[in-house]
Every structure is written in structure tokens, then in C-alpha cells.
Amino acid sequence: MSFLRRRAAVGVAAGALLAGVAVFGSTLTTAQAAGSTLREAAADEGGRFYGVAVNDSMLSNSQYANLVAQEFSSVTAENVMKWETIQPSQGQFNWSGGDRLVNFAQQNNQKVYGHTLVWHSQMPGWLENGNFSAAQLRQITNNHISQVVGRYAGDIERWDVVNEAFNEDGTRRQNKWQQTIGDGYIAEAFRAANAADPSAKLFINDYNVEGINSKSTGMYNLVRSLLDQGVPIHGVGLQTHLILGQVPSSLQQNIQRFADLGLEVVLTEIDIRMQMPSDSSKLQQQANDFRAVTQACLAVSRCTGMTVWGLRDGDSWVPDVFQGYGAPLLFTDSYQKKPAYDAVLSALGGGATTGGTTTNGGTTTNGGTTTNGGTTTNGGTTTNGGTTTNGGTTGGNQGCTATVSQVNQWPGGAQYEIRVTAGSSSISGWSVSFQLRSGETVTQSWNAQLSGSGTITATNVSYNGNVGAGQTTTAGFLTNQGGSHSVSGVSCSA
Ligand code: G3I
């Protein structure tokens, strides 16, 4: 029986645990215009959730708790469900923080995203320093998973079963489980979680895996092989701890390639940090970045939710770890919405319209028409993002542009990169034609299908045909000749 059902059975009012915040259920019933909060706007986008990582010690602050309840449809425990907190001594479980969060979520009609079961960080000392055989560690881990997942069975919809299992080059991180049990530990952890709650959706989660790169490809190859082995894995979490102005251009394509395996994708820990102090142009850039992240998820139907890693800037882990950086979240320390909040709400199709027409988000003031985000003030038409002020038109299908450039060479071979950038409209397929020097032939390619000799045509593959307006996707190929090179006649069509 799940933790919540057990509590109900013994007649303990869930709200009693949350002195001072038991009003949340009624807060949510006050009239809100459709799509005026992140949770409503995300729900209108194919039933997605928009979540937040909750700092347990702030739940007793009514302003904090009210905002979490009002704006978010999912909560993740920032720390209190980690091994260090939940099983601080071997065999002794501390459920207080986890129970508090699950109760809170239940009262406020929120999902709970479980974080996390197997992770090299925040291990209790007895586990970190214990000298266990493979059989012992396997038993300890299975017991932890079955206790924790079992307690919240039916109450926690998704779990990060394994967290941060990869090195930057895509190889396995040498954590305690990898060193003691070996490669099989990941499959074993998923099987244990599935046995404890067959209804929970089980995720593997990591950072620096948002774009297509060595690490995300390592993760991709692993989940493919887990699926081939019949391991119960249902989703991939892309943490999405980003730096201002550095949203990976291949974010959407990366989400798509995991989705194409039949998996859910969730952006699990979004924050976008900037060098402090912040200023209005950095905050505007941050809004653009949050918009791009939101749009990348919305473009893929199996990207089912997004979670920001903390409520207010001051709640964030960032300044403690990245000296000089901060302000990575959607709310200020005084609970005010930042431009990034408005950008996310508008990208989700929520937000305000004063006169005129707004389709798919954006903000329209004093007439005009906004389609697919962007901001229109005093008339004019904005299509696919951008800003139009005092009339004028931005948009139209500009197709795409492309570059083909050599990025490496060696005796007998060279590597090239193809970069395709969508014009002012998004595109749903592309092909790039070009010529290599005589005698130079393609031996291998990735992220594109190459055909022809003389004139070579590279076309998108299943997961990277959709490119957002102004966004770039990359592909590559190898040839049989190093040394001098010439690429000519490059053209792009969408
Ligand atoms: O609870 C103790 C407290 O008793 C003690 O007095 C205090 C003194 O330092 O430390 C407190 O623990 C801190 C804990 O957060 C709870 O506040 C730890 O020092 C601190 O290291 C810990 O940081 C957390 C970090 O994970 C640990 O690695 C951050 O809050 C949390 O945001 C961060 O979250 C991780 C995700 O789980 C995984 N992905 C990356 C993300 C950011 O690092």
C-alpha cells in the first residue's frame, strides 16, 4: 500500500503536516484565466507538466509554498529523497521530507517526480565508505530501491532511477556501482524499481546531455541496448543546467532521437545561469533562452514535461558551485516574475492578450497578430518569434542556409561539418547540396543521409528534420582524402 493510502487509512489528515499551508487546495480553485499560470498553460499543451524542485526547508514559508502550488503541476525533491537523507544509516529510513513533499503535492493536485535512487553524489558515509562485495552492494541497492519506491508506489509517477552515470566522453562513470557490480548495475536498478512499483515511469537522468554530443550519444546507445534487453526503462531526463546564450542548437533533435526510441523525455532540472551582476539585456537573453528550451520540448510530442531546478534565484545551487554566476531561475528572491517567466508562459501558449489575436503564446498589446510566440506591440504581425514594434512584418519562409566546412584532416582522410540554419520560419526537412574536389569521396556520415557523387546531397534523418526558426542543426561526414580541400556550390533547401 502506498504511503498516502496508508496515511488515509489511519485517519491522519494530510494537511495536519503542513501547518499554515493547508489552504492551497482552495487557492487553486480561485478563478484563473485559462493559461495564466505555467501549470495551466503546460496542461493545455498536450497535457504536459511544468514542475519545480522544492527546497524542503522553504515549504513552511507560505509565500513560497503558495507560489509552488499556484504555478507548478509537478514537484521534485531537491534533496530530501536522495540516499543520504532517506537512508542515513544502514537500514534506517527517514521519510519525513519525502512524506512532506508527497502530501503537499497531493493537496495541490501536483505530480511528484522522484529524485533519485542510484547516484554517486550525496551518498551516506556508510555507503560511500563501505567495502562491499558485488553481492552485498546489489542487496543493499535492491533493498533501498524497493523500500523507497515501494513506500511511494502509486504516489510518485516518475523516478530518476540512475543519475549521472556517464563521463563527458560518453563512457561509464566509475562510480561505486560500476566499480563493484560492473556494467549490469543500471539494468538491475531499473528492474528493482519496476518490481517495487510497476506503474512508475523509470528514467535515466544526466547533465550535459541536452545537445547531440559524445555524452548524450553514450546515453543514447545505452538506452537502446537496455530496450533491446527488455529492461523496464521509460524515459530520459535531460537536466538542462545551461549557461546564458548557450542553448545547444541540437536540443530539439536530441530530444527527438530519444523520443524516436519510444521513450519519454523530460527536461528535469532547468536553470540558465549568467555571470553576475545581472542586467536587463542579460535577463532578456535569458528569456530568449528559456523560450528556446520550452519550444524545443513542445516540438516533440513525447517531451512530456519540464521542471525548473528551484523557485527563486536565491534558492538555486548555482552560486555555491559556479563562483560569480547566478540568477538562473524564473522568479526573483521577492517572488517577482522575471522576463524568463513571461517567455516560458508565452511559449506554452499562455499569457495576456489585449486586443488583437494571439495564437500559440506570445503577447499582443493594442492589436496586431502574433503567431507562435514573439511580442507584438502597437500593431504589425509577428510570425515564429521575434519582436515587432509599431507595425511592420517579420516572418515568411526564408528556407534555410547551410555551410559545409572541413573541421579535421589527416593523411588519407578528412572530417567535415554541415551546419543547417532555418530562416525566419521553422522547417520540417532539409537538404544541402555541394561539390567536393575531384576524387574525394564520402566514406561515412552521421545525422544526415548523403547520396550522389559529383554533386552530393545531404538530407536530414528522422530526428533532425524539424529545425526551429533561426535554429541550427549539424551533421557530419568523413572523406577519403586529407590535405587541401575545396567545397563548392553549397545550397540549402527546406
Ligand atoms: O543539509 C545540510 C545541512 O545540514 C548543512 O548544515 C549544510 C552545510 O553545508 O549542508 C546541507 O546540505 C547541503 C544540501 O544541498 C542541502 O541543502 C549540501 O551541503 C549541498 O551540497 C547540497 O547541494 C545540493 C546538490 O545537489 C548536492 O550535490 C543542491 O542543493 C541540489 O540543488 C543539487 O542538485 C543536483 C541534482 O540532485 C542532480 N543534478 C545536479 C543538481 C545540481 O548540482
Image (cartoon, rainbow, N blue to C red):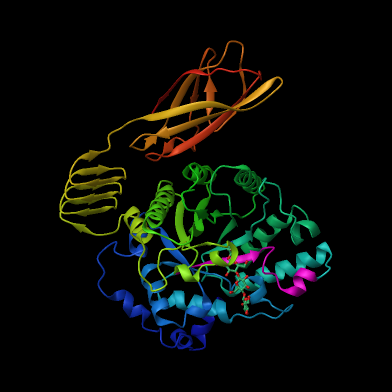
Does residue 337 appear in this view? Answer: yes
Position of residue 261 measured from the top left corner of the image (x, y, whole percent): 55, 44
What residue is at 78 percent from the left and 54 percent from the top? 182
Disc count in the image? 0
Does residue 4 appear in this view? Answer: no
Q: Nearer the viewer, residue 289 or 59?
A: 289
Q: Quadrant of ligand 1?
A: bottom right
Above or below residue 262? Residue 411 is above
Is 98 within the magenta?
no
When asked about the image quadrant of residue 319, the answer is: bottom right
Is 120 within the magenta?
yes
View extreme (top): residue: 438
Q: Quadrant of the N terminus?
A: bottom right
User: On the picture, is 295 further left or further right than 121?
Assistant: left
What residue is at 32 percent from the left and 80 percent from the top? 26
Stretch in magenta: 111-129
Position of residue 286 measured from the top left corner of the image (x, y, whole percent): 41, 55
Above or below residue 75? Residue 62 is below
Q: Quadrant of the C terminus?
A: top left
User: On the picture, is 14 further left or further right than 187?
Assistant: left
Position of residue 46 measured from the top left corner of the image (x, y, whole percent): 37, 54
User: On the picture, is 370 further left or further right than 88?
Assistant: left
Position of residue 83 measured from the top left corner of the image (x, y, whole percent): 66, 71
